[in-house]
Image (spheres, rainbow, N blue to C red):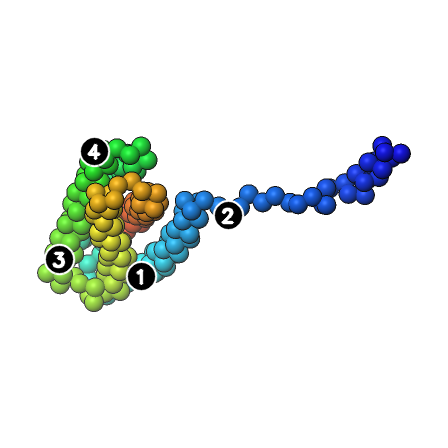
Amino acid sequence: MAMTATYGHAHADPHHLGRAIEHPGPAPKRIVTAYGFWVFLLSDIVMFSCFFAAYAVLVGQTADGPKGSEIFEQRNVAIETVCLLLSSFTCGMASIAADVRNRLWFYLGMAVTCLLGLIFLSIEFREFADLVSRGYGPSRSAFLTAFFSLVGCHGLHVTAGVLWLLTMMAQVFAKGFRADILRRMMCFALFWHALDIIWVAVFSVVYLLGSGV
């Protein structure tokens, strides 16, 4: 009879719904933070996609002004690209150093990343200043408006990234490798690598293809 009762109970409740269902609980803060920041990065990529689309439509609208092949200096663009790609490597090294709580390599990686970012910005600023001084500002043609908007927006993001980088260095110096600071460092690394990926697209679409137009 006991075996029959046990069998009957198991048959009546084959999925053990009578027991309390155990839940793993909320996701760790690191996972939640990373997920939220990925959503932000995707929205940023959507914005850049709009700039790329506008540039693709307006690239031929020069209004008898200069074309890309007449104003782009490939040597400077190559230096910019090398600096930004190298900064992605040094940023990754700084992230690894932060994970293992190594202050020396963290500061070294972040300092080199900052230096490369500043070199990139200085070259881009000189490019813009030179174009404006020659009368090729954003108002000269629809093509130049799209060019300054797309490349300038990326430059503003790099500027924000450098300021964020300096803030992270100051926070680690003052508070050490706390859990919340490591989460911010993770977000910064994602942001910086995303800027590198976007620059590869800018380099390919604007400068490489533009030089042949």
Secondary structure at badge 2 equals loop
Crowd around label 4: few <14 · some 14–19 · many ≥20 (10 Å): few
CA separation, marks 3 and 1? 22 Å
Residue nearer the viewer, 126 or 57? 126
- The residue under label 3 is 129
Residue nearer the viewer, 34 or 89? 34
- The residue under label 2 is 26
Crowd around label 2: few <14 · some 14–19 · many ≥20 (10 Å): few
Q: Is residue 52 left or right of residue 140?
A: right
Please tell me whether mark 3 or mark 4 is closer to you in this view.
4
Image marks 3 and 1: residues in contact by CB distance under 8 Å:
no
Residue furthest left as drawn:
133
- The residue under label 4 is 104
Percent coordinates x, y for residue 73 in the rendering? 17, 48
Percent coordinates x, y for residue 164 in the rendering? 25, 50
Please name the residue shown 39% across and 51% down the image: 37
Q: The disc labelled 3 sits on which kind of residue?
A: Ala
In terms of image quadrants, where is residue 86? top left
Residue nearer the viewer, 183 or 147? 183
Please tell me whether mark 2 or mark 3 is closer to you in this view.
2
CA separation, marks 1 and 4? 48 Å
